Image (spheres, rainbow, N blue to C red):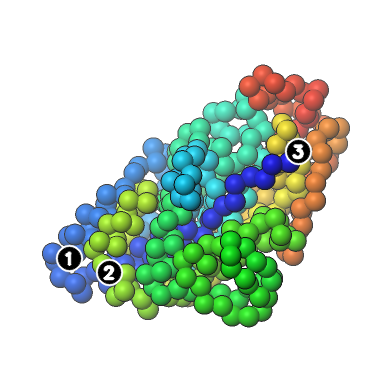
Amino acid sequence: MQHRKKTHPVRNTILVLILLLIAGGAAYGMTRYRSIKNAVNSSFNASGVTKERDVNKQLSDKKPISILLLGTDTGALGRSYKGRTDSMMVVTLNPTTNKTTITSVPRDTAVTIPGFASQSPSKINAAYAWGQARTTIDTIQKMLNIPIDFYALINMGGLEKVIDQVGGVDVTPTLSFTYAGYTFKKGIKTHMNGKKALAYSRMRYDDPDNDYGRQKRQRAVLMALVKKSGSISTLLNQSFISSLAKQTQTDLTFDDLTSLAQNYRSATKNLKETHLQGTGKELNDQSMEVMKKSELQRVTNFIRNGLSLSYKKTGSIAVFSSTNSKSKSRSSSSSSSSSSTETNATTANGGTNNGRYTRQKRSFNTI
């Protein structure tokens, strides 16, 4: 079977660093301030989603907020493929509890994407290809029953620049391996520049925990980068910020980011992270991750707790296999939050994929 493109979710950390940029902006005078503001605002791109809550009030009242971080490889490593997002993370910032949560969502998660039921089951990363940020946000919200207040999309090149600009990051590898010309040794604290950090976060097929192991490494790089908050002065370079803005899209304005930097910074001192854990299945001739309902509920609880929101049942569009499904299981393991496929479904969702698949060939359900 042909290997899929390897992904780079850690580049989403750029958003955190933009917050740090804004925090120190005033010290560089009004002229520099305006230049930075214009550069940051050039990356603004409305999602087109009707917000589930008043985000301006959330910020003004210093209430917890959520940000969906998306990663692409557009133009990176000679790649011109612009469709699917390679990575997704839901970040919550809570200035009341002074906590930040980071939740990785596997790009292969099987869902019924809103507006594209005829293509179900689909990988969640197709949502961006089919409907850009609007459909991606809608999908995440309905899958987990959580509000997404903002989003940020970042290209791989952005992260590499940021890591190099702050002088690299220190990460302790969770396993020993060689990848892309770099060697990593388990348990040995390693200083990594941008290219090396990306190589550490990219390797997938030699990890015993597959994509889940990769997600763990990606979050480790993310958290190492957040700890470089003392490097604000290094990052306050107009040409650097301008080049970075060209690789970022977000519906956070300069004023939003200023508010976050002023009022939410303390939340980054206490980081908690998790991931959505599924079981590998072949659906519609594609490798997908199907989720157990209890696992979806666990992640819903984790994110809603991070936002200080009350309990709600998890969403309704994730796909799981029924007992009579002809899909083929494959191994998918993780050191934490291990889940298995639901087996108590009794009815089939009759979606098709371009008319090639029938209910008789693939049987599946939404929760």
Q: Which residue is mark 1?
A: 32
Quarter holding the N terminus is top right
Q: Amino acid at mark 1?
A: Arg
> In terms of sequence position, does the residue under pointer 1 or pointer 3 come before the other?
1
Quarter holding the C terminus is top right
Q: Are marks 1 and 3 in contact (CB under 8 Å)?
A: no
Q: How far is mark 3 from mark 2, CA to CA?
A: 47 Å
Residue 305 is situated, as x and y percent measured from the top left of the image, at 57, 61
Q: Which residue is mark 3?
A: 282
Q: Amino acid at mark 2?
A: Leu
Q: How far is mark 1 from mark 3, CA to CA?
A: 53 Å
Residue pictured at 67% horizontal, 61% vertical:
213
> In terms of sequence position, does the residue under pointer 3 or pointer 2 come before the other?
2
Q: Are marks 3 and 2 in contact (CB under 8 Å)?
A: no
The image quarter containing residue 218 is bottom right
Residue pictured at 39% horizontal, 73% vertical:
166
Q: Give the camera-side residue of 288 and 202.
A: 202
Q: How far is mark 2 from mark 1, CA to CA?
A: 9 Å
Q: Which residue is mark 2?
A: 236
Q: Residue furthest top?
A: 355
